[in-house]
Amino acid sequence: MTQPLNIVAVVGSTYQPSRTRALVEALAAELEQRLLARTRILQVGDFARPLGQALSREELPAGIEEHLQAIESAGLLIAAAPVYRGSFPGHFKHLFDLVGQEALVGKPVLLAATGGSDRHALVLEHQLRPLFGFFQALTLPIGVYGANADFENYRVTSPALQARLQLAAERAVPLFDAGLRRPLLRAA
């Protein structure tokens, strides 16, 4: 039997509830409709304080080391961050500062972000894509960005954003073995 694809999503938000988390959950649902997969969501806010106290990987508590190992062993990584002052939050970056330099080479990474308005959408191209380019990861061509207006009660409500989530998931599917692909059932 085929093992499910191991999707690990890193949510850079330190707040709960979180639009970034809602975006990731919606994206994971789209991927899981198309791929035999299981998603593990790591929310930086859940471990930001002990993460911030570590200057090196050796200083990390065991739980955060497990998170890093999950990131490094993912079959598909979703990297999602809220825009804060024109970029991703510092704790999000610090987490990736501790990832092994060669650990993400060739790994598919789907980029996602949220922000107050559409003016922040370029964070995908000008902040996140270069970060994962450094790691030589395979960033997927289509990223997903959601502005505050795309959500209601921390749920994706915008038809345009929902269409973008579907397109991102559809474009990710061909990267994976046919044994992981699910037939997509469309409503008639």
Image (cartoon, rainbow, N blue to C red):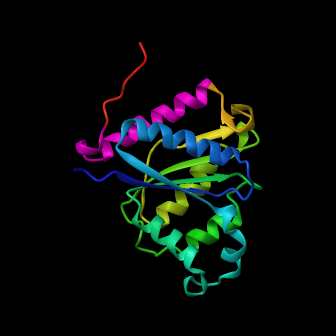
Q: Residue at x 31, y 41 (%)?
A: 174
Give the residue at the far front of this rendering: 1
| Rendered position, 25 above or below 108 | above
Give the residue at the far top of this rendering: 188
Q: Is residue 172 magenta?
A: yes
Question: Residue 81 appears at what percent x and percent y?
Answer: 64, 53
Q: Residue at x 50, y 72 (%)?
A: 66
* Residue 139 vs residue 53, the one in the foreground: 53
* Residue 181 vs residue 110, the one in the foreground: 181
Q: Residue at x 37, y 57 (%)?
A: 75
Residue 179 in the figure: left or right of residue 70:
left
Question: Residue 83 appears at what percent x and percent y?
Answer: 71, 51
Q: Is residue 168 magenta?
A: yes
Question: Residue 50 appears at what percent x and percent y?
Answer: 69, 76
User: Quadrant location of residue 97?
Assistant: bottom right
| Rendered position, 38 above or below 72 | above
Question: Residue 99 appears at what percent x and percent y?
Answer: 51, 73
In the picture, the quarter occupied by the C terminus is: top left
| Rendered position, 28 above or below 64 | above
Q: Residue at x 77, y 56 (%)?
A: 85
Label total for image:
0
Whether residue 187 is visible, yes or no, is yes
Whether residue 122 is visible, yes or no, is no
Q: Which residues, given as a range, are shown in magenta? A: 159-181
Residue 147 in the figure: left or right of residue 185:
right
